[in-house]
Amino acid sequence: MQLVGAVLPALLAHFTGQKMTSTGSSPETQLVLSQVLTLQQQIITNQQSLNQRLVQLETNAIQQFTNLTEQVQGIKSIRLSHSKETKAIEFNNQLENQTN
């Protein structure tokens, strides 16, 4: 904490252009340091939330792709059963014609 407080004036001047006194224990330094730590925690929390959402999106995409693959496979089997039914109907028609 003391190290951060010591370099905080230089960091603040570099990123914001604001000048601070270089004493590490001034109330102004402590306030800015507290705000920086609060914002840092908010950033970490937001990153964790975004990561959880990304994992959920990936999981949903995988499930949808798996379902789509299964549906396509189901369509292939319907085509095969349809051609078998056609042959059976044709065979039945030939039997009826032979018996008449």
Image (tube, grey):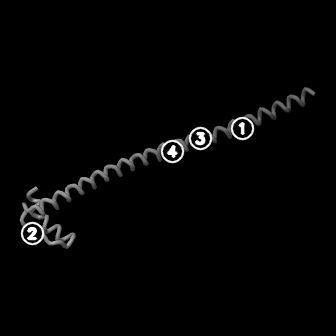
Q: Residue furthest front?
A: 27
Q: CA distance from mark 1 to mark 4?
A: 27 Å
Callout in the foreground (4, 3): 4
Q: Which residue is mark 2?
A: 21
Say the numbered circle drawn on residue 73.
3
Where 84 falls versus 47 (above or below)? above
Say the numbered circle drawn on residue 33.
none
| Amino acid identity at mark 4 | Gln
| Amino acid identity at mark 1 | His
Say the numbered circle drawn on residue 82.
1
Q: Residue sitting at 85 percent across and 32 percent down?
A: 93
In this rendering, position of residue 84 left or right of residue 61: right
Residue 78 x/y as whole percent: 66, 38
Say the numbered circle drawn on residue 64.
4
Q: Nearer the viewer, residue 53 or 19?
A: 19
| Amino acid identity at mark 3 | Gln
Mark 1 or 2 closer to N-term? 2
Mark 1 or 4 closer to N-term? 4
| Amino acid identity at mark 2 | Thr
Crowd band around label 1 with a 10 angstrom C-alpha radius: few (<14), some (14–19), many (20+): few
Mark 1 or 3 closer to N-term? 3
Crowd band around label 3 with a 10 angstrom C-alpha radius: few (<14), some (14–19), many (20+): few
Q: Nearer the viewer, residue 49 or 96?
A: 49
Q: Secondary structure at mark 1?
A: helix
Q: Residue furthest top?
A: 99
Q: Nearer the viewer, residue 98 or 10?
A: 10
Mark 4 or 3 closer to N-term? 4
Q: CA distance from mark 4 to mark 3?
A: 14 Å
Q: Secondary structure at mark 4?
A: helix
Residue 8 x/y as whole percent: 13, 64
* CB contact under 8 Å: marks 2 and 3: no
